[in-house]
Image (spheres, rainbow, N blue to C red):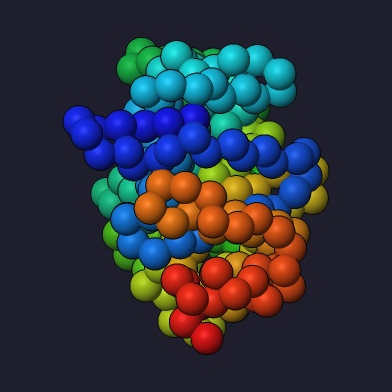
Amino acid sequence: MTVRFGGLAALSMVNFEVKRDEVCAIIGPNGAGKSTFFNCLTGVLKPTSGRILFNGEDITALPSNAISRKGIARSYQITNVMPNATALENVRIAAQSRRHGWNMISHHSAFPDINEKAEAALQLVGLLEKADQLAANLSHGEQRNLEIGIALATEPTLLCLDEPTAGMSAAETHDTVQLIRRIANNLTILIVEHDMQVVMELCHRITVLHYGEILADGTPEEIRRNPKVQEVYLKT
């Protein structure tokens, strides 16, 4: 896959594969192409050339809502929740979009399965006890985890997490790492993350991007020992 903006190649001939039930990370310095990669995968951008296959199906030209329905969900680097809605309402909208399609006419009570699905997603991310609190009143870490709950409510098979621990305290980061471990069963997870300790603890495989190209790909230990990665990214 290649993505060009004018004469600039944000991604250049990137070949990447993630296997079912893997937890993989995309890392690299700022400007390496990580966000462009995620935006192509989730339908925000279209690649200049190349194809994106998901479960054997070509999804390259699909819009983001169609890609979501195929089973790919995403959280964002900047918290993206509805602050004036409750935690339950945030997740319920996502659950309804997957099962019944969004509409402004039918009340959520018309779909008895929606609340059950939304509450299950909140339970997974440890926020069920705060279901009735406004998202604006949750802590930063709780808001980030609510985003994961919103993504889970769409019933994905591939979950893309963009900087899931950004701005978190050490305690919040620890809790989020444990959360990702819990939800990784029967779910493929792709992470963009700057915190190398988080990446090394969580991931089966790490791909390093540098100036839009793949610099290295391997297990955490292989990446830790790779001299090129040490030079351009790990700085050790």
Q: State the residue at coordinates (69%, 41%).
A: 18
Left or right position of 145 against 155:
left
Residue 98 position, x and y percent, is 55, 23
Q: Residue at x 42, y 31 (%)?
A: 2
| Residue 180 on image: x %, y % | 65, 60
Count all numbered tags in the image, as a single digit: 0
Closest to the observer, 207 or 195: 207
148 shown above or below 203? above
- Image x and y of residue 147, in percent: 46, 50
Does residue 130 show up? no
Does residue 33 sit above or below 200 in this rendering? above
In the image, 203 versus 157, the foreground residue is: 203
Residue 156 position within the rendered picture, expressed as x and y whole percent measured from the top left: 63, 34
Q: Is residue 42 left or right of residue 158?
A: left
Along the line of sight, which residue is nearer the eye, 108 or 173? 173
Left of 169 or right of it: where is 179? Answer: right
Could you tell me if residue 219 is visible in this image? Answer: yes
Is 137 drawn above or below residue 12 in the view shown?
A: below
- Residue occupying the point 37% across, 32% down: 3
Residue at 61% from the left image edge and 62% from the top image edge: 126
167 vs 128, left or right, is: left
